[in-house]
């Protein structure tokens, strides 16, 4: 057996950080904007050609263990930014790289002082961008935002039409099309503000999602800790040839969680040395008021029974008939979506009528708001964009572009937009010289990628590099969601402050086995 070895870097910590950041971002930054530059990714489990910054960041690794430790820090924060607003990773990494390279110019680097300067500048960035914000109101505005994220007229119009139907808080998911065409399917559904409990449950590692087709739902307010809490229903489902269990509970932990994980198809059982055969995912109940009401609503929507501690229900007595059903379940880090719940339509219709009447009669503002929130669960529509393409690689690349456009439109619709193409950031002036210079780099990179000027000679005008039009940013569609731009700067500053105040790196790695010649020596 090969032994582990520990690598400690102290004297050249900053040089190691700078080298790792530059290697990572140099690969990603040519993909910024509509130039169409792509990166080929070839892994053991999948291969793809993408221009999606967060996907490249997920798969990026360096051979040097110390540099790769830096990459892991950068990657984690970048992915969290993408999870939060769905876009902006590439611009954020470009700003981070610029900050690190600006700091490298200093002969003496006081990480604590520089971090305080960057954080102060970040607050000033937010204030100035907020003053520039414009709200999105029309379908044409939505289409302009989609076109910035993905230069495809038909898909941009499709996404604009979807959000015009489902509204600012509507749920839009992406799936593969069984044909070469890209189209939209509308279905009932509901969003839950909780994601999967364990990352082992992820069965789509490219997007860090757990997707269960035709799932069965076990709903309970119990805290599940023992094998016996889940084994009986799993065995009954397996005996009936049924797969795919979604557990919504107070919590799933200890032996109960291990029972689910060890039976997952992507997990190798340490005893049998074979992968499991039972796909499942578990989520905790959201930490909100009215959790019992939420369980009852989910039960009505999916046709499930709620196993309640107050009623003394026994989980070991659960039958397949007690489980809810749906077309699909998608669980991410921080949210889950039930698509096409299979509960009684008549029962759901009655609940909707009762809630509408109760809202009209209710005098208390808070109670009326709670009732309206419940009504939204029963009347939500979910749009699924089915993405089609001639080859699997094209389909994957197209899915990422469509997903970026969907996320951009949603965030822009909810929080407004500012001038895009890095122009808004380039015009910000803060008390931090380092940050001021770094904020110019996304615009410079986009100009380099496209080979054209972004700013028109006329004051206040910008150029749309795709259409060739010039004018005010909102009129010509050169815009970015405010929340994405702010999150990108926040992410860059957050990572920078961590890296710039790091005085050493300790990383454990596998020791390479010696060759026969080395052993003989």
Image (tube, rainbow, N blue to C red):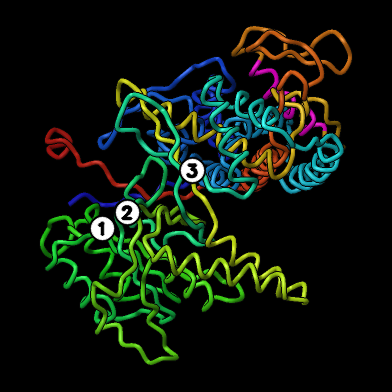
For the point 38% across and 55% down, the residue is 329
Q: Which mark is residue 383?
A: 3
The residue closer to the viewer here, 481 or 384, is 384
For the point 43% across and 26% down, the residue is 398
Q: In the visual, does 135 lie left or right of 448?
A: right
Instruction: Please state the horizontal and vertical placement of residue 51, each as a whole percent of the image.
Output: 48, 24
How many labels were placed on the picture?
A: 3
Q: Which mark is residue 279?
A: 1
Q: Which mark is residue 212?
A: 2
Q: Residues within 10 Å of mark 1 (few under 14, many from 20)?
A: many
Instruction: Please state the horizontal and vertical placement of residue 118, each as a whole percent of the image.
Output: 76, 42
- Say if mark 2 contacts mark 1, CB within 8 Å: yes
Magenta segment boundaries in residue numbering: 433-446
Sequence order check, earlier mark of 2 and 1: 2
Instruction: Please state the horizontal and vertical placement of residue 434, each as a whole percent of the image.
Output: 77, 32
Q: Residues within 10 Å of mark 2 (few under 14, many from 20)?
A: many
Q: In the visual, does 249 lie left or right of 244?
A: right
Magenta span contains residue 444:
yes
Secondary structure under the numbered disc 3 in the rendered image: strand
Q: In the visual, does 160 lie left or right of 3?
A: right
Q: Which mark is residue 238?
A: none
Q: Is residue 421 above or below residue 252?
A: above
Q: Can residue 107 be seen at all in this image of the molecule? A: yes
Magenta span contains residue 156:
no
For the point 67% across and 7% down, the residue is 452
């Amino acid at each position: 057996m090969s032994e582990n070895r520990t690598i400690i870097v102290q004297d050249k910590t900053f040089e190691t950080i700078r080298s790792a950041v530059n290697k990572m971002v140099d690969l990603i930054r040519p993909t910024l904007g509509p130039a169409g530059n792509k990166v080929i990714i070839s892994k053991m489990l999948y291969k793809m050609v993408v221009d999606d910054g967060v996907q490249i960041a997920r798969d990026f690794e360096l051979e040097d263990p110390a540099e790769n430790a830096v990459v892991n820090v950068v990657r984690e924060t970048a992915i969290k930014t993408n999870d939060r607003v769905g876009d902006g990773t590439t611009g954020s990494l470009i700003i981070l790289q610029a900050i690190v390279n600006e700091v490298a110019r200093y002969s003496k680097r006081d990480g604590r002082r520089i971090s305080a300067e960057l954080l102060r500048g970040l607050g000033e960035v937010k204030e100035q961008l907020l003053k520039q914000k414009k709200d999105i109101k029309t379908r044409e505005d939505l289409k302009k935002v989609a076109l910035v994220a993905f230069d495809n007229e038909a898909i941009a119009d499709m996404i604009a039409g979807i959000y015009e139907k489902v509204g600012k808080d509507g749920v839009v998911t992406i799936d593969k099309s069984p044909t070469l065409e890209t189209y939209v399917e509308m279905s009932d559904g509901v969003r839950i503000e909780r994601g999967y409990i364990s990352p082992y449950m992820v069965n789509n590692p490219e997007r860090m999602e757990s997707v269960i087709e035709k799932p069965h739902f076990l709903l309970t307010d119990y805290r599940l800790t023992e094998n016996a809490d889940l084994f009986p229903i799993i065995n009954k489902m397996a005996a009936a040839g049924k797969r795919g269990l979604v557990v919504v509970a107070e919590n799933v932990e200890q032996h109960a969680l291990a029972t689910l994980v060890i039976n997952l198809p992507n997990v190798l059982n340490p005893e049998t040395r074979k992968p499991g055969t039972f796909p499942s995912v578990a989520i905790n109940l959201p930490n909100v008021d009215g959790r019992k009401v939420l369980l009852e609503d989910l039960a009505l929507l999916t046709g499930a029974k709620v196993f309640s501690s107050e009623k003394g229900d026994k989980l070991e007595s659960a039958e397949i008939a007690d489980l809810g059903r749906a077309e699909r379940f998608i669980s991410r880090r921080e949210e889950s979506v039930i698509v096409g719940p299979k509960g009684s339509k008549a029962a759901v219709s009655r609940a909707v009528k009762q809630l509408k009447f109760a809202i009209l009669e209710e005098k208390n503002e808070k109670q009326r708001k709670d009732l309206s929130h419940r009504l939204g669960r029963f009347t939500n529509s979910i749009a699924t964009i089915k993405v089609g393409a001639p080859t699997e690689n094209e389909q994957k690349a197209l899915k990422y572009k469509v997903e970026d456009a969907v996320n951009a439109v949603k965030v822009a619709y909810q929080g407004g937009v500012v001038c895009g193409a890095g122009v808004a950031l380039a015009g910000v002036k803060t008390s931090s010289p380092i940050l001021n210079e770094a904020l110019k780099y996304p615009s410079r990179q986009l100009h380099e990628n496209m080979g054209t000027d972004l700013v028109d000679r006329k004051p206040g005008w910008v150029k749309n590099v795709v259409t060739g039009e010039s004018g005010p940013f909102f009129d010509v569609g050169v815009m970015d969601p405010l929340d994405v731009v702010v999150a990108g700067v926040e992410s860059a500053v957050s990572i920078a402050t961590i890296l710039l105040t790091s005085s050493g790196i300790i990383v454990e790695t596998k020791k390479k086995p010696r060759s026969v010649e080395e052993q003989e020596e």
